[in-house]
Image: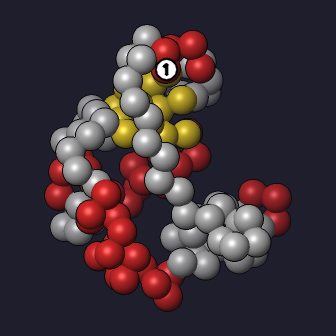
Amino acid sequence: MRQIIVLEFISLDGVIQAPGGPKEDTSGDFELGGWTAHYRDEVFRSIIQKQMKPADLLLGRKTFENWEIFWPKNSDPWPKINEVKKYVLSSTRNNSEWNNSVFLPNLEDIKKL
């Protein structure tokens, strides 16, 4: 199995939901979306651009669905995002118009990569 490197945005009090915007993920009546918005430019410059070398991505379905709306039209800060292979763990989806998206229906399929 290939190496998996995790890059997460999580607050000190354990919030991981909807860092990008207030409407990103309101499931469970979550009202604090966009909690990283004030730091977006700084975070992207100092962390993401240094960490994001060409690599495949392993995404959950919700993250993928947010990203497939945003990144194809906003790839300037991350030019290779539309070229890399995006593996998506999902039992409810099996295709996307976003380039190089591969859907994996269960955890066992990750071991085959």
Mark 1 residue type? Ile
Query: Which residue in the protein does label 1 denote?
Result: 110
The image shows residue 72, relative to residue 92, as above or below, that is: below
In the image, residue 102 lies at what x, y percent?
38, 26
In this figure, which colouring scheme has been used for the structure? secondary structure
Quarter that holds the N terminus: top left
Q: What residue appears at the point 45 percent right and 25 percent down from the top-left corner? A: 103
The vertical placement of 7 against 5, above or below, is below
Q: Is residue 32 visible?
A: yes
Tell me where residue 93 appears, x and y as whole percent: 53, 28
104 relative to 22 in the view: left or right? left
Residue 46 against residue 58 in the figure, above or below: below
| The furthest residue to the bottom | 38
Residue pictured at 49% horizontal, 15% vertical:
111
The residue carrying pointer 1 sits among few (fewer than 14), some (14 to 19) or many (20 or more) residues within 10 Å by Cα, namely some
* Quadrant assignment, res 71: bottom left
* 45 horizontally vs 25: left or right: left
Residue located 61% across and 78% down the image: 35
**Residue 19 on image: x %, y %:** 57, 69
* Residue 18 percent coordinates (x, y): 61, 65
Residue at 52% x, 70% y: name it.
Answer: 20
As drawn, the residue found furthest toward the right would be 28
Query: From the viewer's perspective, is residue 29 above or below residue 45?
Result: above
Query: Which secondary structure, mark 1?
Result: helix
Note whether residue 97 is visible: no
All told, the count of numbered labels is: 1
Could you tell me which quadrant the C terminus lies in?
Answer: top left
Q: Is residue 56 left or right of residue 29?
A: left
